[in-house]
Amino acid sequence: MAIPTRILLVEDNEPLAKLMEEFLRSEGLEVEVAFTGDQALAAAATFRPDIVLCDLRLPDMVGVDIATAFRQNPVTKNALFVIHTAYGEMDIDDIDVPDIDLFVSKPLTPEKLEELLELSRRPHSERRSKLR
């Protein structure tokens, strides 16, 4: 039996987080939810996510700062780090944020999730994408 992909969902909107968690679990994924950046950083060491799906703006920090902390931690440095935002489309090639693998606009669809799972299987150096 294959080990399920682990996704750390970092989302401060609790109703949205609950819906996303249910969707991700229904897809056979193991999910941990954090509502703040501090909670995400604390969960990282024990949960060891394969993918981090992080809101851009949280009550205590921004997703870019969380990504930087993840890249500096040997346990989480190779996780696929995705900013999941309602602020519209952003082209990763136009933004100099080396710690983020891609930006995905909300909502997360089954098609977007499939591409995330595909990207998480690639070597870290081949992950930057224009997925929206």
Image: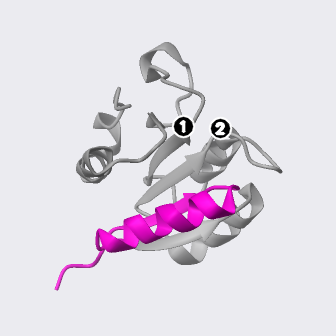
Residue 1 visible? The answer is yes
Earlier residue among tags 1 and 2 = 2
State the residue at coordinates (30%, 75%). 4
Residue at disc 1, secondary structure: loop
Residue contact at pointers 1 and 2, CB within 8 angstroms? yes
The nearer-to-camera label among 1 and 2 is 2
Q: Which residues are magenta?
A: 1-29
State the residue at coordinates (38%, 73%). 25
How far across and how far down the image is residue 129, in percent?
Answer: 34, 30
Of the pair 90 and 111, the residue shown nearer to us: 111
* Residue where numbered disc 1 is placed: 99
Vertical order, 17 against 85 (above or below) = below
Q: Can residue 69 be found in the magenta stretch?
A: no
How far across and how far down the image is residue 19, in percent?
Answer: 51, 64
Kindly identify which numbered label has been placed on residue 64.
Answer: 2
Q: CA distance from mark 1 to mark 2?
A: 7 Å
State the residue at coordinates (63%, 71%). 43
Q: Residues within 10 Å of mark 2 (few under 14, many from 20)?
A: many
Occupied quadrant, residue 29: bottom left
